[in-house]
Image (cartoon, coloured by chain):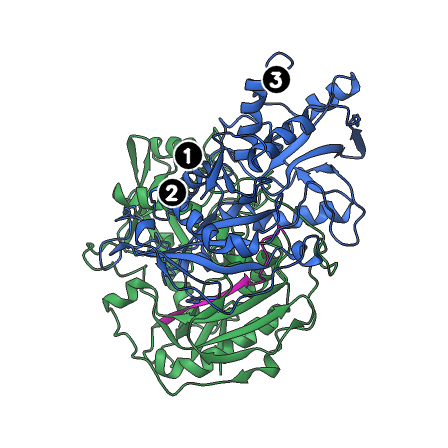
Chain colours: A green, B blue
Amino acid sequence: MSAQTSTGANGTNGSTASPKGQPDASKLKFDLTTALKDVPKPGSTELWEQNVATDHMVTCRWTVQNGWEDPVIKPFGDLTISPLASCLHYATQCFEGMKVYRGYDNRVRLFRPDRNAKRLVMSAQRVSLPGFDPEQLVELIKALVRVDAKKWLPEPGSFRYIRPALIGTGRQLGVQIPKKAILMITLVCWPDFSTESPPGVDPRSDLRLITSRNDTIRAWPGGFGYAKVGANYGPSFASHCEAQQAGYDQVLWLLGEEGQVTEAGATPLTDRVILDGVTRRSVLDLVESRLSEELEVREAKFTIKDIEAAWRNGLLQEAFVSGTAFFIKNVSTIRVGDFNIDLPQKQDDGSAFGPRIKSWLKDIMFGGEDHEWGVVVE
Amino acid sequence: MSAQTSTGANGTNGSTASPKGQPDASKLKFDLTTALKDVPKPGSTELWEQNVATDHMVTCRWTVQNGWEDPVIKPFGDLTISPLASCLHYATQCFEGMKVYRGYDNRVRLFRPDRNAKRLVMSAQRVSLPGFDPEQLVELIKALVRVDAKKWLPEPGSFRYIRPALIGTGRQLGVQIPKKAILMITLVCWPDFSTESPPGVDPRSDLRLITSRNDTIRAWPGGFGYAKVGANYGPSFASHCEAQQAGYDQVLWLLGEEGQVTEAGATPLTDRVILDGVTRRSVLDLVESRLSEELEVREAKFTIKDIEAAWRNGLLQEAFVSGTAFFIKNVSTIRVGDFNIDLPQKQDDGSAFGPRIKSWLKDIMFGGEDHEWGVVVE
C-alpha cells in the first residue's frame, strides 16, 4: 500500500461529498470577450490538431463547504491549478464528448444531450467528484452554444465538438475525496472523422482495427470501463500508437483468455467494462424501430474467435464502429495475430446497414428529420 | 469507441515521443523567493491536510519538438494549464512518493531515491509521457532539498514528503500522445502515519483492513496496477471512503473469484497488478540479509481464503503493511465479509518482526546506521 488515507481535520474526508445547490444555469454570469479569435476554415489542417477552442467557455466551481457556486461564461483561457491538485495526481477527472450541429434548416441542434449529462454525473460518482442536476448542465451547454454558435458554426451541415469536463482541483495529496472541483464546458473545432482524413493520409472512409495484445487490457469487470473517466484513456495511448504505427486506425480491445470483444460498439453492458455510448444506444434504438423486419437486435458476449468463425463460414456481412468523435465508420479489416479478417465491402447501393443508419442519424442531427433526439437550441 | 485517434499535421502523433536531451540538473536555474511561508509546528493539525508545500518547487518543461528545457527552482505556486490539457482529460500523469529525513546526526538523507526515479520513468512510459535519465531527477530532488531543508526540516528525527510528478500539458483533445509535459517536484509537510493519528481520532498504532467488494477491482493483469499513475487512484477513492465509514483504515484489494490478495505488500510482482514498492522491496531485502535464520522469504500468490485458513489453524502470526506514506504499520484486523480476522497482537518485546524491520529502516533513514540506502544530501 503505497499511499495513505486520513480523516481530515474538518471531518469531511472519508465521507462522500454531497452536492449542495446546483450549477444553476439561471444564475449564469456573462463575462464576454471582445478579443475574438479567427475561425479555422472548413477542411483546414488546424482542425486535426483538435485544440482550437471557441471564444468562450463555461466554468462552475464547487467546494465541499459551499457546494456549487454560480456558473460563468467567460473568455476561453488557461486555468490556474495548484501543483498539488487532486486531478493532476489521482486522475479525479471525467468528461463527456458531444457535438453541436448547424442544420440544413439553419437551426442549431444538440443530439440527445440529456444522455451525456446523466453519464457525466455517473462518471463523476465513479471518481468521487460531486454530483449535480444533469438538466442544469444541458442548459449551460445551450447557453455557451447561444453565445458562440453564430460566429463559430455558420455553415449548414457543419458541427463543433462540445467537451464538458469535471476535475478535482482541491490542493491535497492525501488519498481523499476532492474538496474542490471545477465543471467546465469548452467548444472545440473538430475534423469530420467519418468523411475526411488527416493531412498526408490517404482519404479512406473505412476503418482498420487491430486486436489488443494479451498483456494489454483496457478495462475489466469491477473496474471503470463503463465510466468516461480520464483513467481509461492515458494508459491506452501506447496501444493506440502501436496500432497506428502498424497501419491500423483503432484497437479492438479484447478481454480475458477467450478474447471477449469489448469496445466495438456491440458488447452488452452488464459487465460494465464498456461505455453506454450515446451513438451506440441510438444505433440500437433505430435498428429496433426501423429495421425490425430485416434485423433482430441481440446484445450478447462474443469472442474474437466467434468473429473469426463467422468470417470463415461466410456469415460475417458487415461491421461498423460508432461513437461521437468518429460517428459511424465502416470496418474493413480486423487484424488478429498474424492474419487479417477482411470484411466484405458493400457497394453503396442501400444494402449495407451502417450507411443507412448513419444517414438516419445525420438527418436527425442536421434537421432533415424532426425527431425528439435532435434538441434545437433557440 | 467513443474517442478518436488521428495522425497529426506535424506527423508526431502515433509515434512514441522520444526524449530529447534531459532535465539537466547541471543547468538548473534558480529563481528564489524572499516571501517565505510559515512552517507548521510539529504535530499540528495542518499536517493532516497534506497540502502545505515548502517555499520552492522544481519544474522542467518538455515539448515533442525540443525535448527537455532547462529545469528551474522557483517559488511554489499555481500552474497555468489549458482547459484542453491532456492531463486533465486523459489522465496522462504519473508521480512518485518519497521522503527526506533529518537524521539524528543532523545530516539530511533520502532513502533509495534511485528506485523512485527509475519507477517514475517506467510509469511515464505506461501513460505515454516522455522518458528521462533518472539520475537527473535524483539530482533535482537533492537541489530542492538543499534550498528548503534548512528552514523546513530543522528537527532531527523529522521528515518531509517529496512528490515528483509528470503531467501531459499539451492542449489536445485527440487521443494522442501528449506533445507537452511538465516534470515538477514539490516538498510537502506530512504527518507521521506510523505513530500519530489525525485530530479527533483515537491514537492507534495498528491498522484495520477490510477486503474489497467483488464488484470493485483495483487493478487487473494487463492493466497498469504496477505503475504509479493517477489512473490507479481516483477510481479507488470511493472504496477507501466506504472502508473508513465502516471504521477501517484501508482496503485490502482482492482479485478474481478466488479472492487473490493483491495490494498488501506481499504479492508477487509477476502479474503486474501491484506496485514494486520501495519500502516493500527494502523489507524483503532486510529479511533476507538479517533474518534468514528465522524466516524464509517466499513471494507467492495467496488468496483471502488461504489467510483465513491459516488464521483458523492458529498459523497466522503477524501481518503488516508497508509503504512510503504509511511506512510500516501493524495490521490488527482484516474484515472479510461479515467476520473479522483478528491478528494476535504481540507485545513489544522484540519477538514481532514488523517492529524490528521498522526500526532497522528508521536507523538507515535517520543515520543511526550507515547504509548505502541512506543517501546523504550534502
Q: Looking at the image, which is closer to me, B243 or A54?
A: B243
Q: Which residue is mark 1?
A: A304
- Evaluate if marks 2 and 3 touch, with contact meaning CB atoms under 8 Å apart: no
Label 2 CA crowd tier, 10 Å (few <14, some 14–19, many 20+): some
Q: Which residue is mark 2?
A: B125
Q: Residue at x 69, y 68 (%)?
A: A65
Q: Which residues are magenta?
A: A159-175
What's the CA distance linking mark 2 and mark 3? 36 Å
Q: Which residue is mark 3?
A: B291
Q: Residue at x 51, y 28 (%)?
A: B269
Q: Looking at the image, which is closer to me, A284 or A46?
A: A46
Residues marked 2 and 1, same chain: no
Secondary-structure class at tag 1: helix
- Left or right of B15, for residue B76: right
Secondary-structure class at tag 3: loop
Secondary-structure class at tag 2: helix
- The answer for which chain carries disc 2 is B
Q: Looking at the image, which is closer to me, A316 or A14?
A: A14
- The answer for which chain carries disc 3 is B
Can you tell which of label 2 and label 3 is closer to the viewer?
3
Q: Amino acid at mark 2?
A: Gln
As displayed, is residue B66 above or below residue A306?
below
Q: Amino acid at mark 3?
A: Leu
What's the CA distance linking mark 1 and mark 3? 50 Å
Question: In x, y percent, where is residue A114?
Answer: 56, 67
As displayed, is residue A302 above or below residue A326?
above
